[in-house]
Amino acid sequence: MVALGAKNKGEPSDLNLSLDMASPVTAEEAVTTELRRAIREGLLVPGQRLTQSEIAGQLGVSRIPLRDALRRLEVESLVKIEGHKGARVTELTADDVAEIYEMRIAFEAKCMAYAVDNISKETARILAVAATASADNTLSPSEAFNQRRSFYSDIYHHANRPRMRRIIMQLRDNVDRYHLLSNRAHAHRSHNELADAIADRKPSRAAAVLVEHICESRDDLIEELERGQHV
Amino acid sequence: MVALGAKNKGEPSDLNLSLDMASPVTAEEAVTTELRRAIREGLLVPGQRLTQSEIAGQLGVSRIPLRDALRRLEVESLVKIEGHKGARVTELTADDVAEIYEMRIAFEAKCMAYAVDNISKETARILAVAATASADNTLSPSEAFNQRRSFYSDIYHHANRPRMRRIIMQLRDNVDRYHLLSNRAHAHRSHNELADAIADRKPSRAAAVLVEHICESRDDLIEELERGQHV
DNA sequence: CCCGTTGATGATGGATACAGTATACCGCGA
DNA sequence: TCGCGGTATACTGTATCCATCATCAACGGG
């Protein structure tokens, strides 16, 4: 079950993947979760070829559940499956990133406002604490990322928009993997402002702060992407 | 290859499905398209159980491509797959519909404005003609529906927002199948207004007309749904 | 008479095996 | 030497088969 990257052929497939097999009912579910995580955290880099037998072997499962997982991830735009040619991790252009952020802004602003509008005073306090905590960068970058991710997931949960929340998280997954490069200078200040707005339960202010934060993040990423392309 | 509904067991599975096999490269692709169409057009009603062997047999394929298709449709929220229990066509509550429409309004308004902003004068004229044509109800309800659907798909294509467009079409698929019941009284007027706005190339006006149109459609559907629930 | 248990049945999830297609490599000819 | 064609290979797509789990009904006990 535990996996091992061994047969590097030419692609940089040094990935070591493993399934936890804790909660999921089916292997396909476990594979999907693991692959999604691997892509989000950059273990599977954009453009990388995903050979079915290879990945399946590394995960200790057959090709069937792996294919199911790939189909799902394709609808989530994390991989691209082509005819009889195979699957690859999707690559994003600057335009793609801009479009994704446009959608994120539209939905996340709504959800943030709804959430802050709905939550009780105690919940607001708890979430504000979580916001400041996720700004503390005493932990590793990837850990901090997961922290922030679950923080937003928690907040948006209170917006009572399950479908919108799901789309938001998918959109985040699509761009998050590119954020390994970006600098996170103003993240602290933004998150603290957001925590204040949440604690004070001011929906429109929270949404505004969030939008500004997302815009900064977007501009960083796009700049990084375009710089990388010019090289 | 041609299918035939025969073995009704208890569920109202009178469906007759068939694959065209024209363009698609893989059987899974054909199955996905056909199932999506069947769900959108109401051949597969919400809540209906989708037994793998049955559907696969009716489509003349094995269970494998069918399962792949189901996985995709699950991410699109058209079917719900549960553990070891099977797949069903998803049902929508009034809240779900409201949420979906909220997202549609946000995205479609943007796309309509972008599209009208981008298109040339000739394209505007062509699209306006298509808009009025799709309002002419000399053809069957389902035909009119597909006409409108492809009309919007065409327009949004000019918005240069491929991801947003894809999400929009998925959201439409999720609610369209409930529109068989709804009355389409004001559709004519709205579409004519929209055609004018497009022909005049006024983005904000086109978006406003569209939003109003979508809102009317939403209210019709929600009212219908709640009436159905109270019965 | 009711309820919990247990066995049978059917469907789903997964593995193995096979067919078809795209790609790469190699040889041939200009 | 370069371009082209053919074959060989490797991977994908699909079908068939097996294991596992859920559902339901019958049976026995309280």
Image: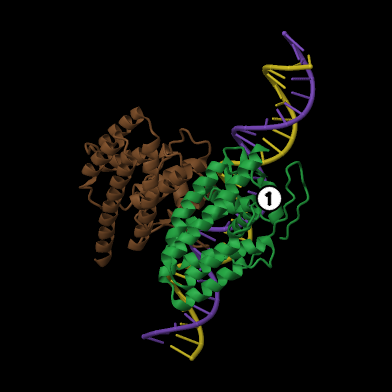
Chain colours: A green, B brown, C purple, D yellow
Horizontal side of residue B197 vs B171, given as left or right: left
* Circle 1 chain: A
From where the camera sits, is residue A192 visible?
yes
Measured from the top left, where is residue B221 in percent x and y?
28, 55
Most foreground residue, B138 or B165: B165
Query: Where in the figure is residue A43, as x and y percent of width and height?
Result: 68, 53
Front-most of residues C9 and A145: A145
Left or right, residue A96 beside residue B117: right
Residue assigned mark 1: A55
Instruction: Establish if A55 lies above or below A205.
Output: above
Residue visible at 73% across and 45% down in the picture: A12
B85 w.r.t. A67: above or below: below
Q: Quadrant of the N terminus of chain A?
A: bottom right
- Quadrant of res A121: bottom left
**Residue that appears at 42% across and 53% down:** B78
Along the line of sight, which residue is nearer the eye, A161 or B227?
A161
Q: Secondary structure at mark 1?
A: helix
Q: Is residue A196 left or right of residue A60?
A: left
Q: Position of residue A96 (x, y in %)?
A: 53, 44
- Residue C5 lies, in percent from the top left, at 53, 80
Image quarter (top left, top right, bottom left or bottom right) of the C terminus of chain A: top right
Amino acid type for the residue under numbered disc 1: Ile
Check disc 1: other Cα within 10 Å, few if <14, some if 14-19, many if 20+.
many
